[in-house]
Amino acid sequence: MTVEQIKLIHEILALAWGGGDGVIRGATETDLKVVATSPTSLAVTVGAGRAFISRGIYKLDRDINTLSVVPPSTLPRIDLVVARLADWSAIIVEGAEAIRPVPLVPRADEMVLAELYLRPKMTLIQDADDSLNGYISDVRLFV
């Protein structure tokens, strides 16, 4: 099979599942879910799973831990945990510090899995907000 034939098959499959970006319908609750590491740290864990991104198939074979974030220096910020189609990676994209931070817009070959709300002087990232540390907001879409 040629590369072009494989791309065509991916597009047909993506259209069959609704045509948009997202974790493949029928996935388990933990597919591509971002959670706090155990023990908690300044990194997060991204669960294994599959998705469509820009009509291409994305696959993460096993759970992975991201690199640690550097806490903001003076104001809060929102970082994105994204699945990147180009190299089947899951990475953190750093946002900008602001009084009322807003998430960045992902690149065309990326799908946002979670937003990380980060505070100055935080020491870890948790699954829920404790008003002191960073926390995870699940923003996965399903197709």
Image (spheres, rainbow, N blue to C red):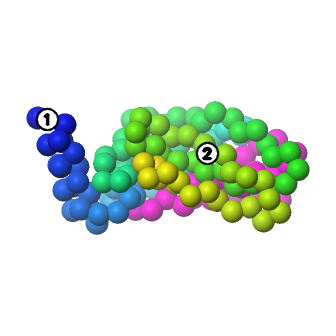
Mark positioned earlier in the residue sequence (2 or 1) = 1
Q: Amino acid at mark 2?
A: Val
Q: Residue placed at 69% from the left, 62% from the top?
A: 102
Q: Which residue type carries mark 1? A: Thr
Judging depth in this view, the residue of 48 and 10 nearest the camera is: 10
The residue under the point 86% across, 45% down is: 73
Q: Which mark is residue 2?
A: 1
Residue 43 placement (x, y as % from top left): 67, 38
- Residue occupying the far left of the picture: 1
Helix, strand or loop status at disc 2: strand
Is residue 127 located in the magenta-colored stretch of the structure? yes
Q: In front: 42, or 84? A: 84
Q: Is residue 83 visible?
A: yes
- Identify the secondary structure beneath mark 1: loop
Which residues make up the magenta segment?
Answer: 114-143
**Looking at the rendering, which quadrant does residue 45 occupy?**
top right
- Look at mark 2 in the image and give the residue it sits on: 93
* Neighbourhood count class around disc 1 (C-alpha, 10 Å): few under 14, some 14–19, many 20 upward: few
Q: State how far apart marks 2 and 1 are (Cα).
A: 33 Å
The answer to whether residue 106 is above or below residue 46 is below
16 to the left or right of 63: left
Q: Residue at x 60, y 36 (%)?
A: 66
Residue 106 horizontal/vertical position (percent): 53, 54
Specify the principal SS of the magenta part. Answer: loop
- Determine if the magenta segment contains residue 68: no
Q: Position of residue 14 (x, y in %)?
A: 26, 57
Q: Where, quadrant-wise, is the C terminus in this rendering?
A: bottom left
**Can the viewer see residue 27?**
no
